[in-house]
Image (spheres, rainbow, N blue to C red):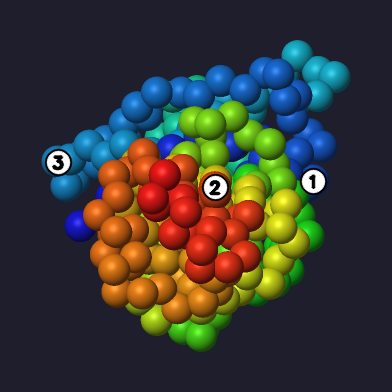
Amino acid sequence: MLDHDRLFKELLGTFFVEFVDLFFPDLADLLERDSVVFLDKELITDVTAGEKVEADLVVKVRLRTQESFFLVHIETQSEAQSEFGYRMFRYFARLYEKHRLPIYPIAVFSFTEPKRVEPTLYQIGFPDFPVLQFNYRVVQLNRLDWRSYLKQPNPVAAALMAKMNITPAERAQVKLECLRMLATLKLNRARMQLISGFVDTYLSLTDAEIGRFAQELATIMPAEREQVMQIVTSWLQEGRQQEALTIVLRQLSRRVGELSPENKARVEALSVEELEQLSEALLDFAVPQDLQQWLDS
């Protein structure tokens, strides 16, 4: 079972400011970027149920040009839940009771179905008297068009496009676009691996989709293709060898034509280190003899 909460918490914790920039520019204008402090293990006690739960992400930030602070609470949800609004209000109430700071509540829905519009408020009232109307902000990924984020050079966009509204026929194309964006961001190795791993987790391709990925990859500019292949190489290093090997074989087929059974077997028998070298060398191949010469050497 995928630990969705951990994956999203790691992504949004690493790229909190970029997440706010992408989805809540007005909030981004309010906060002092150098003041971000993550509050560890904010436990919410439910006395009636006799349980304690941990809020996903609680961040303390300072208002820009002021000495006052506020909290940003981000809760991720991988399954639709009928009582989610009450849960957000309960977290809000407990956090406010503890910290006595204004709270900006955000819900991130990452489930694929249903695609109905999820509520953004929790309310209590009577026909003649509205007692409470608690509002929270929502990012509902399955209702977002991934194409709208292609031109936004943001690491969170590069990752979360993998969970947006994607048709089955678009999966290979979206994965390539995620990696193309990632290749342009010039992140350090650890952050690149975080995002590429996130994308690979949620867009793990079938053999047929890997073929379409390789076809799409062959159509982009050589310099950009090389950057994407470097990310594919990193999958070999992280143990996602089969998908990377399949992409390398597809790229070889497009570069030098159909591989002979002998050469295909030789490629499949290569070590991870040798496959990494081949993934870089094949970008310069033009004819079958280039592969043969490389293998012989």
Callout in the foreground (2, 1)? 2
Decide: marks 3, 2 in contact (CB < 8 A)? no
Count residues near mark 3 (Cα–Cα under 10 Å), then give few for <14, some for 14-19, many for 20+. few
Q: Is residue 63 above or below residue 131?
A: above
Residue at the extreme left of the image, as rendered: 50
Q: Which residue is mark 2?
A: 280
Q: Is residue 99 above or below residue 74?
A: above
Residue placed most toward the observer, 109 or 101: 109
Residue placed most toward the observer, 75 or 260: 260
Which quarter of the picture shows residue 68? top right
29 lies left or right of 290: right
- Secondary structure beneath dot 3 equals loop
The mark found on residue 50 in the picture is 3
Which quarter of the picture shows residue 269? bottom left
Q: CA distance from mark 2 to mark 1?
A: 43 Å
Mark earlier in primary sequence (1, 3): 1
Callout in the foreground (3, 2)? 2
Amino acid type of the residue that numbered disc 1 sits on in the rendered structure: Asp
Q: Which residue is mark 1?
A: 26
In this rendering, does residue 40 appear at all?
yes
Amino acid type of the residue that numbered disc 2 sits on in the rendered structure: Glu
Q: CA distance from mark 1 to mark 3?
A: 38 Å
Q: Residue at x 51, y 63 (%)?
A: 289
Mark earlier in primary sequence (3, 2): 3
Q: Residue at x 79, y 46 (%)?
A: 26
Considering the image in quadrants, where does the C terminus appear?
top left
Residue placed most toward the observer, 221 or 40: 221
Count residues near mark 1 (Cα–Cα under 10 Å), then give few for <14, some for 14-19, many for 20+. few
